[in-house]
Amino acid sequence: MVKSGKKWNMISFIGKYYHNLDQKGRVILPSSIREVLANKYSSGKLYLTTAPFDKALHLYPLEEWIKLEDKIRQLPKSDESVIYFLRRVIASATPCEMDKQGRILIPYEYRKDAGINSEVVIVGQIDRVEIWDKDTWDSVTDPSKVDIKRIQDGLAKYGL
């Protein structure tokens, strides 16, 4: 965050927010997420796609999506991991617009693929946003369901 006058401006997507889908499958993006979109990204365009391994969705600003595509273009298209990523993530990507109320539509097929019902958790991940069904999020972030020692050791390698 950067202090601007007496207000802190978010410079990356962070935080965890709980929201409900409306009857049309729309969800409002939290004001801090909208603030980052407005202040850091000039295009206002978004891409929605399935997560590569989780039952979740990823939302990218156009500028971050372009960086991801540039990385993918450099990889060998014959590599099994790259093929999987192309099929799972790139093939499912769709442009997504935020309306004047700050909502995005999550198409039915995407909700179904991610197991999203009515309650969602919107999670900032620095350069992208994740959208989870609340029950799935609660399950994957439950400390009793992960090998804490293995995670601690893995993070210690990175100085975290």
Image: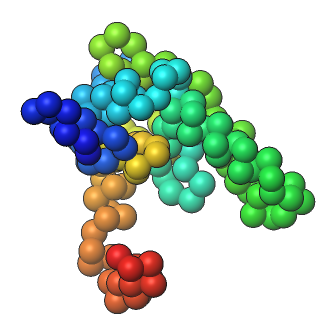
Q: Is residue 100 above or below residue 40?
A: above
At a point 51% along the width and 57% down the height, the residue shown is: 54
Residue 54 vertical placement versus 121 (above, below) = below
From the viewer's perspective, is 54 left or right of 152? Answer: right
Quadrant of residue 53 in the image? bottom right
Colour theme: rainbow
Q: Quadrant of the C terminus?
A: bottom left
Q: Can you give x and y, in whole percent of width and height, for residue 84 in the image?
A: 74, 56
Is 113 rendered above or below residue 30?
Answer: below
Q: Residue furthest right?
A: 78
* The quadrant where residue 157 appears: bottom left
Reply above or below: 42 against 57. above
Is residue 54 something that shows in the picture? yes
Give x and y (percent) for residue 66: 65, 37
Residue sitting at x 74%, y 50% = 72
Residue at the spot 80% in from the left edge and 53% down from the top edge:
74
Q: Nearer the viewer, residue 66 or 145?
A: 66
Q: Is 18 on the left or on the right of 6, as rendered?
A: right
Foreground pick, 79 / 38: 38
Q: Which residue, as the protein is rendered here, is positioned at the far top?
A: 100
Q: Residue drawn 42% across and 19% down?
A: 98
Residue 120: in sight, yes or no?
Answer: no
Task: Residue 108: give x, y in percent of width and height.
Answer: 51, 29
- State the residue in front, 121 or 25: 121
The residue lying furthest to the left in this view is: 6
Q: Quadrant of the N terminus?
A: top left
Residue 124 percent across, percent down from the top left: 35, 46
